[in-house]
Image: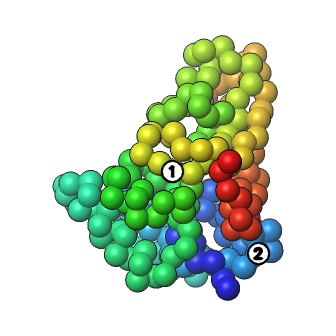
Amino acid sequence: MTNRIAILISGRGSNMVAIANAIDDGRIPNAEIAIVISDQPYAKGLRIAHERGLKTLVIERGGRKREEHDREIISILREERVDLICLAGYMRILSPLFVDAYKDRILNIHPSLLPLFRGLDPQRQALDHGAKTSGCTVHFVDNALDGGPVIAQRTVPVLEDDTVDTLSARILEQEHILYPEAIASVLSGFKVK
Ligand code: GRF
């Protein structure tokens, strides 16, 4: 059976591309991208997904309550018979309605070694704290912000002369390796202890 993946984005979409590449070259076996959904109509990643021949859809918040927005997304995910949802730079917090509808089937990637530096600007937080090591984490999404169980992590050194940009770039390179590995591991039965 082919696992149908939905990728939710808000921006650049480089992790989405990394996942699509990994499916194409067999690093994520038995999987296909069912749909790429963006809450932002001008997300760069949308154009890239479209050019790649992926099905795309914009579902804007449009001033609605979080639950109402999520309800529309859930109905599309059901229509598309989605098995796994990968948040990839999706800048909205999911409602409990969404999290509960797809329990243990929503993954997120975050550019820090969780549980350190949750929330916004984790690379800046790492630099401000004088961290000597940082990295990225793929985790299951639960109702706590960047809080669900960890699936996999990769570390990078923080260098003396790092800026937010140089550290972010070093972490991003590892994100593109980590996310496909974590997805493959979840699809082959990874469970939280
Ligand atoms: C990545 O750093 C990811 O860890 C974070 O948002 C960024 C998204 O980048 N959640 P991209 O859109 O995948 O290029």
The residue carrying mark 2 has its beta carbon less than 8 Å from ligand 1: no
The kind of residue on which mark 2 rests is Pro
- Image vertical order of residue 50 relative to residue 141, above or below: below
Q: Closer to us: mark 1 or mark 2?
A: 1
Q: Residue at x 70, y 35 (%)?
A: 135
Q: Looking at the image, which is closer to me, 96 or 77? A: 96
The earlier-in-sequence mark between 1 and 2 is: 2
Give the percent coordinates (x, y) of residue 16.
60, 62
Confirm whether residue 105 shows in the render.
Answer: yes
**Residue 75 percent location from the top left of the image:** 34, 75
Residue 106 image offset from top left, x and y in percent: 52, 59
Mark 2 secondary-structure assignment: loop
| Ligand 1 under 8 Å from disc 1 Cβ | no
Local SS, label 1: loop
* Point 63% across, 56% down: residue: 15
The residue sitting at the front extreme is 193
Residue at left 52%, top 70%?
6
Closer to us: 69 or 157: 69
Which residue in the structure is indicated by mark 1? 141
**Three-letter residue code for mark 1:** Val
- Crowd band around label 2 with a 10 angstrom C-alpha radius: few (<14), some (14–19), many (20+): some
Across and down, in percent, residue 182 comes to: 71, 56
In the rendered view, does 133 fall on the left or right side of 15?
right
| Picture disc at residue 29 | 2
Q: 138 or 40: nearer the eye? A: 138
Residue 138 seen: no
Q: How many marks?
A: 2
